Image (cartoon, helix red, strand yellow):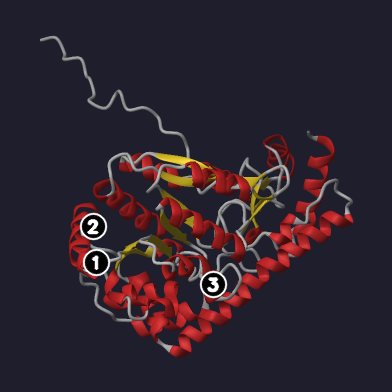
Amino acid sequence: MEPIEEMSLWSGVPQAPVDPIYSVSLAYKADTHPQKVDVSVGAYRCPGGKPFVMKCIYEAEKRLLGANKEYLPIDGICDFNRNSAELLFGDAMKGHEKRMVTVQALSGTGALRLGVIFIRKYLPAGTIVYASRPTWTNHHNICKESGVPSAEYAYYDTKNSRLDFDGMMRDIENAPNGSVFILHLCAHNPTGCDPTREQWEAIADLMAKKRHIPFMDCAYQGYASGDLDNDAFSARLFFERGFELLSAQSYSKNFGLYGERAGALTIVSKKADNIPRMLSQLKMDIRAMYSSPPTHGARLVATILADPELRALWVTELKEMSGRIREMRQALLDALKERNVPGDWTHITSQIGMFTYTGLNPAQVKLLVEKYHIYLLSSGRVSVAGLNHNNVAYVADAIADAVANVQ
């Protein structure tokens, strides 16, 4: 008998592009150079360059020793959900709790995915989700894989290293009425460039006129400025203005719970009687995707937020972490000035949060990687958390070389 030619059902599966952030991180790990530097990954590092676990997390974990590992409800831990909404919206939500629904999610990514699916199902067909140019690349991936059209709005003026406010307002004005706009709560990823409070007010005015829906991406509350209330200004502004909105909260950065996947999705409605039905549909989507959320990270967050002593420790640590980021921004700027590197580098300290958009072009980045073993994204985005007093001079030397010799 002639052998049957082996064929596979999956032969037509194309190779997907490698995620740029993970590919750079993998290249760094494989490099054996003694002076290698990783300023690509969006994770906090201690002054010695090592992963960092917050003291408040250690203390909360002690209290959770022996906690059961039973399934959570589909929408997660009730206290975690309530505390998440209160953390974001503060006193503004008092008396309005029945107009919002919060569900536990698989960090910010999972919250965004749940929210985009909800948009696909319950907003008019063809509703466009707008993300800033540039933005976190996963925003568009999430929309594409959820079957929702996405587009860009102007955000960053690369020539002058500042917010392109006029372009942003123009694109908000020109978008079809009722569009969804993903807005970064604070510490914009990847630019570190945020609107001022006055600009946020103008953005809210125009979005109200156009009946647009804000979708707040909240990855850095408390980690940007060290002040939880200050960092939540934009979300509270839209809430107080009466917008129906969505918010995706992540506790990866501000609690250091990267691998625990703790996050929350909140949707605000004008009418309280919509909420039970909205919750029922969110639970149905969660049930179909992953059944129920993981326990440990959310229990840690709920424990810390509910305990005054642990919460105070957390706030203190947030201030220390954000302070170290500001310190390293200043150190890099000072080092570049000492070396008389051509150009205006003051945007390094005027930006905020984990990332700085350096202005380095792909060719200059290539030199940093290949000659100096400094790993960053081709866009020139640097994770300031990867800098410390042991490597900042080395990084400045490399930037000086790149700027002088590569156009």
Relative horizontal placement of residue 253, taking residue 14 as reference (left or right): right
Q: Which residue is mark 3?
A: 222
Q: Position of residue 280 (x, y in %)?
A: 18, 62
Task: From the viewer's side, name the closer residue of 334 and 275.
Answer: 275
C-alpha gap between disc 2 and disc 1: 8 Å
- Check disc 1 and report the residue beneath it: 75
Q: In the current view of this chain or complex, which residue is farthest to the bottom? A: 309
Q: Is residue 156 left or right of residue 307?
A: right
Count of marks overlaid on the render: 3
Which of the 4 image quadrants contains residue 267? bottom left
Q: Residue at x 31, y 54 (%)?
A: 114
Marks 2 and 3, how far apart in space? 28 Å
Type of amino acid at the residue the image marks with label 1: Asp
Percent coordinates x, y for residue 362 in the rendering: 67, 36
> Between disc 2 and disc 1, whose residue precedes?
1
Task: Answer whether labels 2 and 1 touch (C-beta < 8 Å).
Answer: yes
Q: Nearer the viewer, residue 163 or 259?
A: 163
Compared with residue 316, is residue 15 higher up or lower down, i.e. above or below? above
Disc 2 residue crowd, few under 14, some 14–19, many 20+, Cα 10 Å: many
Disc 1 residue crowd, few under 14, some 14–19, many 20+, Cα 10 Å: many
Numbered disc 3: secondary structure: loop
Amino acid type at circle 2 is Ile
Callout 1 secondary element = loop
Q: Which mark is residue 368?
A: none
Residue closer to the observer: 180 or 326: 180
Judging depth in this view, the residue of 211 and 251 nearest the camera is 211
Residue 307 is at least partly visible in this image: yes
Q: Earlier in the sequence, mark 1 or mark 3?
A: 1
